[in-house]
Image (tube, rainbow, N blue to C red):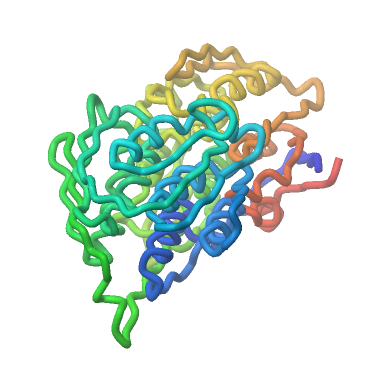
Amino acid sequence: MNLLLKSSTCIPQSIIAITGSKSETNRLLLLQALYPNLILENTSNSDDSEVMMKALQSNETLIDIHHAGTAMRFLTAYFAIQENREVVLTGSSRMKERPIKILVDALRQLGAEISYEENEGFPPIRIKGKKITQNKVSLSANVSSQYISALLLIAPKLENGLELTLEGKITSVPYIKMTLSLLNELGIETSFIDNKITVKPLVTLSAVEGPNPLSLIVESDWSSASYYYSIIALSAIGTEITLSSYKKNSLQGDSVLAEIYKNFGVETTFQNNTVLLKKTHNSKLITQNLQLNNSPDIAQTIAVTCFGLGIGCHLTGLQTLKIKETDRLLALKTELEKLGANVLITNDSLTLEPSVIARHELIPISTYQDHRMAMAFAPLALKTNIIIKDAEVVSKSYPAFWEDLKSIGFQLENH
């Protein structure tokens, strides 16, 4: 499905309810599988979370997680400790190009039995679940935090817990801290000192074994909120959008949006469990120099926002973007340049020169089976007509995205 987004104006005041964080949901779904009396509220309705839930409930030998990278990593660790269970984890053609070797090597260090079905270092993988008693493992600290979180999530079920040493500079610290905070909410003892993380064993969770199970509410997704920050930044002064449900002391790394978007004239106000986004000024904007090691998923949104405002940016700490649903750095460069931008990329950075949107023709934006490409470019409809190709890809993380855009004044039609 290709969508034509006609040049639109955001209505002055609107309210959007966004479902739970995909990152929190997928972590908690795995913990719920390990400790079944845990009750979850406001879980994500994303494709990724649906895939995760179905995989955890499946009794099949072959489990296909399609494009869900988080599920691939978390489930690799989960099935490694399911004694007497053998599964093959596979996915889409793109998933078979996304590396899993770092996590597999770490699990093998602990004693897990995992082999490759096709290409060394990549899915599909065959996992023979077993009891794991070893508890010390080390891996490079600058890898995707999902490898680290996958190990931490199963750690309480290991007979001797886990002592994880991270070598080098750590990437995406907030996502590691999110995982540890969720473990702490379940009463699991952890520590994170310098480059060493320790998780104590907890075979049964007493808090959820009795008549009063433990209930946790998933905070809404800050990555999904990023697109509304972009919309407000590109809108007229005084435009407001209220989003729910969010916490000021969020565990999510992408909550840094509230600070970053001050630079674009967007004010964030926390009210109970909501955030009010308001465009407050159009003062002269300058080139943005941002280090996004801890929040790489918002890089696409920020780059497109800067382009829409006619300013430049230099974004660094983006090394993990090359192994996402697509090579996001290359995809951003390709699609922004279609619109008249001048973009330079390296393995871990993107530089956008100040430029003006080319309005002389209707440009189709390719999405590369990547939900964030579709949603990051959508706010440009506030500046010009634009076509988003394969627009249904948003269901991976935010199925209601296009309907929510309509509710705030965007004009959409099939193309």
Q: Quadrant of the C terminus?
A: top right
At x 24%, y 75%, the residue is 206
Residue at the spot 33% in from the left edge and 45% down from the top edge: 151
The residue lying furthest to the right in this view is: 415
The answer to whether residue 14 is visible is: no
Residue 213 vertical position relative to residue 27 in the rendered view, above or below = below
- Residue at (28, 52) in percent of width and height: 155
Q: Is residue 381 visible?
A: yes
Residue 413 point in image, percent of width and height: 83, 46
Q: Residue furthest left?
A: 193
Q: What residue sits 72% from the left and 32% below the top?
A: 384
Q: Quadrant of residue 296?
A: top left
How many marks the image carries: the answer is 0
Q: Measured from the top left, where is residue 161 in percent x and y?
A: 21, 53
Quarter-wise, where is residue 30 in the image? bottom left
Identify the image quadrant of residue 317: top left
Q: Is residue 257 left or right of residue 201?
A: right
Q: Nearer the viewer, residue 255 or 150?
A: 150
From the top left corner, tell me how far across and down residue 249 is, in percent.
Answer: 29, 55
Point out the image quarter for the N terminus. Answer: top right
Establish if 315 lies above or below 25: above
Of all residues shown, which one is farthest toward the front?
Answer: 84
Residue closest to the eye, 31 or 90: 90
Q: Is residue 244 above or below residue 381?
A: below
Q: Nearer the viewer, residue 19 or 158?
A: 158
